[in-house]
Amino acid sequence: MSVLRESLDAAFRTAGLRPTAQRYAVLEFLARRPRHATAEEIFHAVNRADPRASRATVYNSLRALAGVGLAREVASEGGAARFEAGLQPHHHFLCDQCGSLEDVPWFELPAGTGAASLGGRAIRGYEIVFRGTCANCEK
Amino acid sequence: MSVLRESLDAAFRTAGLRPTAQRYAVLEFLARRPRHATAEEIFHAVNRADPRASRATVYNSLRALAGVGLAREVASEGGAARFEAGLQPHHHFLCDQCGSLEDVPWFELPAGTGAASLGGRAIRGYEIVFRGTCANCEK
DNA sequence: GTCTAACTTTAGACATATTCTAATTAGTAA
DNA sequence: TTACTAATTAGAATATGTCTAAAGTTAGAC
């Protein structure tokens, strides 16, 4: 059993999620890969390993994984939903020109930022979506 | 001609966008209304005014309006895309429990926040998406 | 190890959301 | 008005996501 598999296994147990081959496959794919995979991409990848895997299972797995924080849906615009392994937090950058979605290394909001605007809510996390022109299009 | 219509008209001209009845209807609906309308809701509203309006036109109009900044698609998760008039900037809050999407009054990031993470990109704007439990579910 | 109950997966139908296409209509500028 | 171009229409086509019933797995009790 690979090191990755062991750590995923531990992650499942910690999360109290029943480990299945399909959930491994989905999470492993997300953990290994460039971010922001669509359900369709995940389905194909998982399907290469196990040709019987079904679309519904990919969605089920993604929901299960997202439910315990092992994966998350990226708040994106248009088209298919995109998912990523929920390992390290980060922000996102969306290019107006070419539409690419890039990761931005994590940084915290200075303590208290916006506190006055958020009254009554319990904040568990946040993400900043920047828009503009990416380094490539900027040239 | 109403005051709203006049200001929308001016907005179209400024944006260099050909003003059509359907685009007026879509933008007017967004400008008047609670935020975060789905294309379907917009379609029905526009359709009440002009029963011949088509879905495709609603999508076309939304894209045209978004292209010039008069409307924007809200980065949301799952289900149908949501749109809002692009008038005042604000942040968003997404409730883990009930899934509701709320506006959070605008506040600026302190100058220089995250600058080190964003090198090479031209930032035109940003939005913070908070997650947690809304005031209602918190009770 | 075997049994059982609960959970998960499967295939494919179904439902919903969005885009495309060809023909028609409306806006613009001369 | 006329000619030109862009936008709209209806509905088909596509893409995305969910549901269902039957079959397969897993965890835990024995």
Image (cartoon, coloured by chain):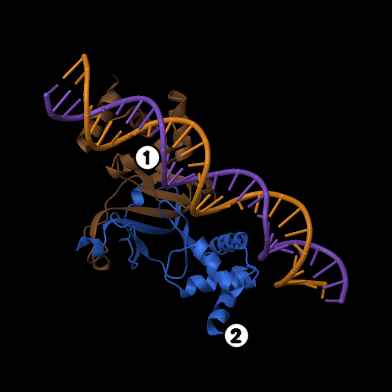
Chain colours: A brown, B blue, C orange, D purple
Q: Mark 1 points at which residue?
A: A60
Q: Where is residue B46 in the image (x, y as percent from the top left)?
A: 57, 70
**Closer to the camera, B53 or C29?**
B53
Percent coordinates x, y for residue A139 in the rendering: 54, 47
Chain ID, mark 1:
A
Q: Is residue D7 left or right of residue A10?
A: right
In-front residue for pair C20/A132 = C20
Q: In this view, does A80 lie to the left or right of C3?
A: right
| Closer to the eye: label 1 or 2 | 1
Q: Can residue A71 be seen in this view?
A: no
Residue at the spot x=22%, y=37% of the render?
Answer: A16
**Residue at 57% of width from left, 81% of height from top?**
B6
Q: Mark 2 points at which residue?
A: B1
> B112 or B77: which is nearer to us?
B77
Q: Residue C26: image x %, image y %?
A: 71, 72
Q: Position of residue B84 (x, y in %)?
A: 46, 65
